[in-house]
């Protein structure tokens, strides 16, 4: 879908401030930053189910300035207030971990809430029900979305490569180029946005069932293989107690044998912001199945009793 004709756009400015008397920057850095910036816009578009058409304006001479025109549509209908909402969402996301005053941050969030309501009102006037835009989803996205965080990290990491860059300005503006809000991020604060690691918080599943395909019957760090939720996986058996029981023959596996366990799924995020599974670890084994009957392991019994005790203590208060 192309942008509607004869409609005002919402404008967004990226202003690269360089050291005095410098009016050029590394083209590779600039293009790489623009690529990450457009990736952020595309991710927000997908998350909020919006069509965002972004046009870049002609360059201004003597300054490293990028003006972007935003035309935002929902279900084929252009909504000006949605464009205002999107450019402010981008500005908040690109700057929210800076040293901005907490009170100012709250004011910006309240302003975004107001824009959501205005967008819904404009939608109703055009017989469009904005079902995918709500406060919870929006702020959860900009706070927790790991793909967006990685794309933002890439943006600032690439900015740091420009040695003459001293700051970058993000401005939301109206159709007449009048600033609605302006935020400047100094070079020394770029690191606040760069991820220290590509590792994500692991997923913990306390009662996972894994069908064992190939146990490891000898000492070592070889990985076991099994089927988890219909997929074949390789995993590390971190329970030395359970491994010993298997190695001495106290526990035997047959075709179709399974374990109930505490499974940790370790994840990371690639350079494009996509989540990937790095590895699977079985932290402890609650029980194994013998002739389809569950047999509780000693560590499984201890863990169960500990949880029951903790629950009992909570109930006392």
Image: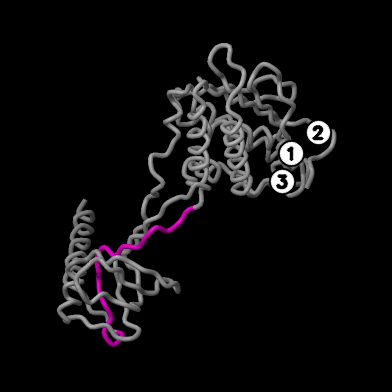
Residue of label 3: 74
Q: Residue at x 23, y 83 (%)?
A: 252
On residue 161, which mark appears? none
Q: Position of residue 153 (x, y in %)?
A: 48, 38
Label 1 near label 3: C-beta < 8 Å? yes
N-terminal-most mark, 3 or 1? 3
Secondary structure of the residue carrying numbered label 2: loop
C-alpha distance separating marks 3 and 1: 7 Å
Residue 269, above or below 30: below
On residue 79, which mark appears? 1
Q: Position of residue 109 (x, y in %)?
A: 53, 32
Q: Quadrant of residue 290?
A: bottom left
On residue 7, which mark appears? 2
Q: Position of residue 172 (x, y in %)?
A: 63, 26
Q: Quadrant of residue 277?
A: bottom left
Of residue 42 and residue 298, the one placed in the foreground of this image is 42
Q: Residue at x 35, y 73 (%)?
A: 225
Q: Quadrant of residue 34?
A: top right
In the rendered image, is residue 182 in sight?
yes
N-terminal-most mark, 1 or 2? 2
Q: Is residue 290 magenta?
A: yes
Query: Taken as a whole, is the magenta stretch helix, strand or loop?
Result: strand
N-terminal-most mark, 2 or 3? 2
Residue 198, above or below 171: below
Secondary structure of the residue carrying numbered label 1: loop
Q: Is residue 287 magenta?
A: yes
Q: Residue at x 34, y 58 (%)?
A: 204
Q: Which residues are magenta?
A: 275-292
Callout 2 crowding tier (Cα within 10 Å): few <14, some 14–19, many ≥20: few
Label 2 near label 1: C-beta < 8 Å? no
């Amino acid at each position: 879908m192309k942008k509607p004709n004869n409609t005002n756009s919402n404008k967004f400015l990226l202003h690269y401030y360089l050291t005095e008397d410098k009016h050029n920057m590394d083209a590779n850095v600039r293009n790489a930053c623009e690529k990450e910036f457009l990736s952020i816009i595309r991710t927000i578009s997908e998350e909020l189910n919006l069509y965002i058409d972004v046009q870049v304006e002609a360059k201004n001479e003597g300054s490293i300035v990028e003006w972007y025109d935003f035309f935002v549509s929902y279900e084929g209908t252009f909504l000006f207030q949605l464009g205002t909402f999107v450019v402010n969402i981008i500005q908040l996301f690109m700057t929210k971990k800076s040293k901005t005053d907490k009170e100012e941050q709250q004011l910006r969030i309240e302003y975004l809430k107001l824009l959501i309501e205005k967008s819904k009102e404009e939608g109703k006037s055009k017989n469009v029900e904005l079902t995918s835009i709500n406060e919870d989803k929006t702020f959860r996205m900009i706070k927790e979305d790991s793909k967006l965080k990685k794309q933002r990290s890439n943006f600032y990491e690439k900015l740091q490569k420009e040695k003459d860059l001293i700051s970058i300005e993000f401005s939301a503006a109206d159709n007449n180029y009048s600033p609605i809000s302006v935020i400047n991020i100094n070079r020394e604060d770029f690191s606040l946005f760069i991820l220290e690691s590509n590792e994500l918080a692991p997923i913990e599943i306390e009662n996972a069932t894994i069908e064992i395909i190939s146990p490891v019957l000898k000492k070592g760090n070889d990985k076991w293989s099994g089927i988890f939720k219909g997929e074949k996986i390789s995993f590390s058996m971190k329970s030395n107690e359970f491994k010993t029981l298997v190695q001495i023959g106290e526990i035997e596996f047959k075709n179709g044998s399974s374990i109930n366990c505490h499974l940790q799924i370790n994840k990371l995020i690639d350079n494009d912001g996509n989540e990937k599974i790095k590895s699977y670890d079985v932290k402890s084994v609650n029980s194994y199945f013998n002739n389809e009957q569950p047999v509780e392991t000693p560590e499984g019994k201890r863990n169960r009793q500990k949880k029951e005790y903790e629950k009992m203590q909570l109930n006392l208060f």
